[in-house]
Amino acid sequence: DTGVSQNPRHKITKRGQNVTFRCDPISEHNRLYWYRQTLGQGPEFLTYFQNEAQLEKSRLLSDRFSAERPKGSFSTLEIQRTEQGDSAMYLCASSLGTGLAGELFFGEGSRLTVL
Amino acid sequence: GQQVMQIPQYQHVQEGEDFTTYCNSSTTLSNIQWYKQRPGGHPVFLIQLVKSGEVKKQKRLTFQFGEAKKNSSLHITATQTTDVGTYFCAGPLTGANNLFFGTGTRLTVIP
């Protein structure tokens, strides 16, 4: 399978715990995006990498959220001190390009439930 | 801040009827993309429009980008049950290379 891979697919955690999600993009894609989606809503932009550089981060994103893409390949999204409001589907997407955002290829997502 | 709104939020149609969803941005968009998300699935790219007034067709789907590049529409002719899902438009924030998704239109097709 050469698509975008995310794991874990499901994570249940207690409030206050830290969680980490991993995304493996399509191998030749230089751009990687993280989105959050809650039921009935559109994907909400969190952050975006071009190669290993984090170029944009949502101003609405709490300091408890951090993302890395150390070698310009896979990426991790960590949420510290989780809150119930963090419960959502976390979507990763990748694309190829250097100019305007092109077609995004999404992974299946990682669903987080914070108890 | 910049907003991308879609109407309607929900649409129920009988199979065979047409369907249209509208996307409106508060600012001019350099381009607009459309995605479809099936229930329980992830967004899947449908098309990208770049030019003012552009119209593109994919079988029963017709996509338009407004002359002012602030609105777009997706029209489905003779809906089928396979068209069920939520349709999102998405455009980049001003000067950015990310994609800001609209609120989506959830389509239900009644057989």
Image (cartoon, coloured by chain):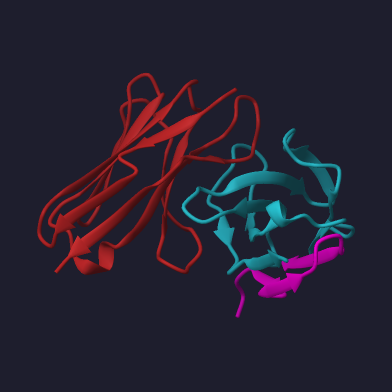
Chain colours: A cyan, B red
Q: Residue at x 51, y 56 (%)?
A: A39
**A52, A93: nearer the viewer:** A93
Q: In which quarter of the image is residue A90?
A: bottom right
Residue A112: x and y, percent? 68, 65
The residue stretch that appears in magenta: A1-25
Question: Along the line of sight, which residue is nearer the eye, A8 or A5?
Answer: A8
Q: Position of residue B41 (x, y in %)?
A: 48, 67
Figure quadrant of the N terminus of chain B: top right
Vertical comparison of A51 with B20: above or below: below
| B67 left or right of B25 in image | left
**Residue at the extreme left of the image, as rendered:** B16
Q: Residue furthest bottom?
A: A1
Task: Give the vertical position of A93 relative to B81 (above or below).
Answer: above
Q: Which residue is drawn at 41% across and 45% down?
A: B104
Q: Is residue A28 above or below residue A96?
A: below
Does the rendering let one see residue A13?
yes
Name the spot of residue A107 as percent of width and height, x first: 60, 66
Against A102, is A23 above or below? below
Horizontal side of A20 relative to B67 (left or right) equals right
Q: Residue at x 21, y 62 (%)?
A: B109
Q: Nearer the viewer, residue A77 or B76?
A: A77
A23 in magenta: yes
x 26%, y 68%: residue: B82
